[in-house]
Image: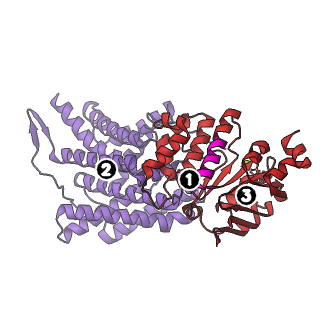
Amino acid sequence: METFIQQVVSGLATGGIYGSVALALVMIYQATDVVNFAQGEMAMFSTYLAWTLLQAGLPYWAAFFLTVAISFAGGLLIERVIVRPVEQAPVLTIVIVCIGLLVILNSVAGWIYSYIQKPFPSPFPQTPIHAGAIVFGAHDIGVIAVTLVVLAFLYVFFRYTTLGLAMRAAAQNPISSRLVGIRVGWMLALGWALAAAIGAVAGMMVAPIVFLDPTMMSGILIYAFASATLGGFTSPGGAVLGGLLVGVTENLVGTYVPFIGTELKLTVALAMILVVLVVKPSGLFGRVVVRRV
Amino acid sequence: MALLEVEHLEAQYGWTKVLHGVSFAVEDGGITTILGANGAGKTTTLRAVCGMLRTAGTVRFDGRRIDGKATEDIVRLGIAHAPEGRGTFVQLTVEENLRLGAYGRRDLRDLARDYDRVYQLFPVLAQRRHQTAGTLSGGEQQMLAVARALMLRPRLLLLDEPSLGLAPLVVREIFRVVRTINREERVSVLLVEQNAAMALSLADHAYLVETGRVVMSGAAADLRRDDAVRRSYLGY
Ligand SMILES: Nc1ncnc2c1ncn2[C@@H]1O[C@H](COP(=O)(O)OP(=O)(O)O)[C@@H](O)[C@H]1O
Ligand SMILES: [Mg+2]
């Protein structure tokens, strides 16, 4: 029983990270119908930025918030400079631009920082937390808390602010949005900025677990795809729940199904994508989108 | 003085030209209607005024050129557009739709009073304020489109066939509101319609458009008495 609870909690921690990245994917997808394949590499790059700031001697949380702010600006810049020129182009063109961005960010990170893994600090205590006979990793609990704070912030932003409302409107109905005076282009850019900022948080939270290297987010991105697919790609809440579900399932299957272990965990995620796509293509929480052609 | 002055407006979709030099004006405080059959170019005209299409010709609002400006900027000058198809944000609530209507406004004081005002004009929207707008009936969505446009506190209201597909009773209610806001708040109106009888009874000035050209214009009362108009547009 103790093992079970421990595995669920640590699954919620990694699941929260998958869910955050999935949320970032869904945000861009809803606004532009494009899956941002560079999301993982953007997060990786942000994490290196945090590492640089920490090396320069900044206290952890100062580096954390500065990284989030710079990533936000970086996301805005990427949309304005790289994505905007192909905004009207076919989806495939935009996907290729995203993949190009992925390759560039990956190479540049490797070039600046080398491909050698670096340890990345956790802001949370090293000592485990004991609750009766159950032992929790402090980092896991911390990650869950950080994820909840991010989600609460986003919820309040989208639900209760005029800017958040305008972003939702621009994603749903760009033509009507222009007719009420919303600058739709900037709303898309803001979506990229938020996605980059969320990715930065996810990167900094996962780096202490997987270590920092230019490919550290590629596995996470696949889990995030699984989460978003599970949640239905059209539902932000679904993406987060999908993430938690993937995280917990992955841990439990790894623990209780002997032949899977840690090596085959990624397969579990891929299997989940496949099952969802076959059984319920719109995802567990997604709406069926009827497209007029 | 004319609030909106359009001269030699031309517009095209791809290679097909659909407006061939349309000229018209909306007097400050007046109601102008553009009548025409399906496909005459009425919607295109409104889109062109709002900068949703590339055009040739000049569009002046309050004496200043607005052709070539971005839609968002034109809206912010106080031109609200209740578009063809109603433009409802179907996944958002009625109240969120209204809040978006006020998005392009500089002065957000009295926002609460403006909600009250449109709810008073369209009481059914008040009952549905927390409902998803996509669940409203066609008539309610048309009311919402007008209400959303009014939330901008516009100087000029563009209405694209508000009567389309609606029961006569609902149409009358919407036209009553348009008359009210024109009289009480001095909002100028450009109304595009196929329903010539209703439009001519509301408007003070009318233009007749056929295949992208103005073929007749004058005081609404005169057009209503014109034999040709009566035969082809009023059906008696
Ligand atoms: N998006 C479009 N693409 C191509 N042609 C269009 C488009 N919209 C309208 N048209 C054409 O332009 C002409 C004028 O259309 P429209 O302005 O919608 O007329 P109305 O509103 O008077 O019914 C019609 O011949 C129509 O087929
Ligand atoms: Mg039309």
Answer yes or no: disc 3 within 8 Å of ligand 1.
Answer: yes
Image quadrant assignment for residue A8: top left
Per the image, the residue denoted by label 2 is A153
What is the chief secondary structure element of the magenta stretch? helix
Q: Is residue A105 above or below residue A239?
A: below
Please name the amino acid that badge 3 sits on. Thr
Magenta highlight range: B174-187
| Separation of marks 2 and 3 at Cα, in angstroms | 43 Å
Image quadrant assignment for residue B195: top right
Apparent side of residue B201 relative to residue B226 in the rendered image (left or right): left
**Chain represented in red:** B
For disc 2, the neighbor class at 10 Å (few under 14, some 14 to 19, many from 20) is few
Image quadrant assignment for residue A102: bottom left
Per the image, the residue denoted by label 1 is A174
Q: Quadrant of the N terminus of chain A?
A: top left
Q: Disc number at residue A11?
A: none
Secondary structure type for disc 2:
helix
Secondary structure type for disc 1:
helix
Q: Chain of mark 2?
A: A
Q: Chain of mark 1?
A: A
B185 in magenta: yes
Choose mark 2 or mark 3, whichever is in front: 3
The percent coordinates of residue A163 (x first, y second) are 42, 55
| Separation of marks 2 and 1 at Cα, in angstroms | 25 Å
Q: Colour of chain A?
A: purple
